[in-house]
Image (spheres, helix red, strand yellow):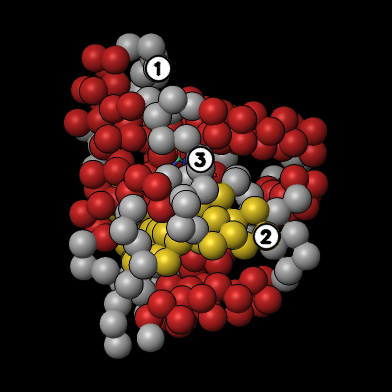
Amino acid sequence: MKKINIAIDGWSSCGKSTMARQLANALNYIFIDSGAMYRAIALYFIQQRINLDDHLAIEKGLEQISLSFQKNIQTGNNEIWMNGENVEQLIREMEVASKVSDVAAIKAVRAFAVAQQQAMGQQKGIVMDGRDIGTVVFPNAELKLFVTADPAIRLERRYQELLQTNPAIIREEVAANLQQRDLMDSTRAHSPLKQADDALVLDNTNLDRAQQFELAMKWAMEKIN
Ligand code: DC
């Protein structure tokens, strides 16, 4: 069967990664969470106390970062490793969430991540989710989806997700973080979140995971056949 690349973009916490993972599993494709790469870079800058205004330190820092995705045999999920350490859990913490949009707005950081993402796509059979996948990373992707959902629904989903690992999480903090990331991701100078002209819009406000997956899978099969 012909292999294609599937680019999935959209707002924070609108279910992109879940759908991308489901699609990749069903099609036997590789799922890449591009946001995890920006989160890992943000984690490194936090750990190394790199000042985001210090361009030289950023360039030097990036040279020290080695990122890869490896399948976790227990969960079957593709997880991110940085410099020999599995950082899949660490990158989901609020400290990283609060810095990652600033980090992802830096031109050198984007160039570093995009080059690796494009290399991964050369073999086809990739489902990648992010903000600029259909516009910048894979402008020729055979299928582009732009995912949206009502902001209140997105907040509830993200809050419930974080609550699982942090019972003390405060809803207002999660709301403020989401709003700020949406604003920064869509207004930054380099590769802002934008719907590609040829993307199909998937509004999942009133869809559950199974319904969303069914629709995306239908669109994917139309492109593959
Ligand atoms: O999808 P996420 O919430 O894990 O993404 C983390 C941050 O990285 C978010 O602020 C947007 C940014 N990002 C980006 O700029 N480009 C991408 N392709 C993916 C994520």
Density class for disc 2 (Cα within 10 Å; few <14, some 14-19, many ≥20) is: some
Nearer the N terminus, badge 3 or badge 2?
3
Q: What residue is shown with label 2?
A: 203
Q: CA distance from mark 3 to mark 2?
A: 16 Å
Q: Are marks 2 and 1 in contact (CB under 8 Å)?
A: no
The image quadrant of residue 72 is bottom left
Q: Cβ(mark 1) to ligand 1 < 8 Å?
A: no
The kind of residue on which mark 3 rests is Leu
Nearer the N terminus, badge 2 or badge 1?
1
Give the side of residue 150 with respect to residue 67, left or right. Answer: right
Question: Compared with residue 26, is residue 201 higher up or lower down, i.e. above or below?
Answer: above
The answer to whether residue 170 of the structure is visible from this angle is: no
* Mark number, residue 52: 1
**Residue sitting at 67 percent across and 60 percent down?**
203
Which residue is most to the front? Answer: 197
Give the side of residue 224 with respect to residue 65, left or right. Answer: right
The kind of residue on which mark 2 rests is Asp
**Residue sitting at 60 percent across and 45 percent down?**
12
Q: CA distance from mark 3 to mark 1?
A: 21 Å
Q: What residue is shown with label 3?
A: 193
